[in-house]
Amino acid sequence: MNIQITTRHESHISDDTKAFIESEVSGLVKFYDKITSAHVVCDREIHKNGQEDTVEIDLNVDGTTLSATATEENLGKAIDAVIEKMTRQLKKKNEKVKEHK
């Protein structure tokens, strides 16, 4: 699977964080094995009340695109939340494929 990680608004992420994201996204294959590529976008917005980190994942699966977005107060929580959302979508897609046979 091809995994592309980008950042917006000049927010930088460490190599450890990139490795964590790659391992989490690679782990999604166990829920649906026909994932061809993934695009992960990390964004940090700073407000008066603090900062918000947003993580978006777009997966190419069987010619369709699945998307999930999560916004939390730190990057780790946002990554966990978006992986959980994507896991639910992949499980649902896998069930639909199995039931239509």
Image (cartoon, helix red, strand yellow):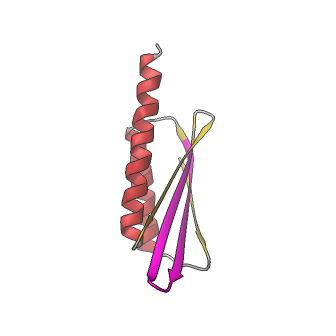
Residue lying at the far top in this picture: please name it: 101
Q: Observer-nearest residue: 7 or 49?
A: 49
Q: State the residue at coordinates (37%, 50%).
A: 84
Q: Position of residue 1 (x, y in %)?
A: 53, 47
Q: Position of residue 48 (x, y in %)?
A: 49, 86
Residue lying at the far bottom in this picture: please name it: 48
Q: State the residue at coordinates (46%, 67%).
A: 18
Q: Quadrant of residue 19?
A: bottom left
Q: How many marks?
A: 0
Residue lying at the far front in this picture: please name it: 48
Q: Observer-nearest residue: 27 or 42?
A: 42
Above or below for 89 versus 5: above
Q: Quadrant of residue 72?
A: bottom left
Above or below for 2 versus 17: above
Q: Is residue 40 magenta?
A: yes
Q: State the residue at coordinates (57%, 47%).
A: 37
Q: Observer-nearest residue: 35 or 85?
A: 85
Residue 57 appears in the rendering: yes
Q: Position of residue 34 (x, y in %)?
A: 51, 35
Above or below for 5 versus 91: below
Identify the magenta region.
36-59
Q: Position of residue 50 (x, y in %)?
A: 44, 83
Residue 14 appears in the rendering: no
Q: Is residue 62 magenta?
A: no
Query: Magenta residues: mostly which secondary structure?
Result: strand
Q: Observer-nearest residue: 45 or 4?
A: 45
Q: State the residue at coordinates (61%, 36%).
A: 64
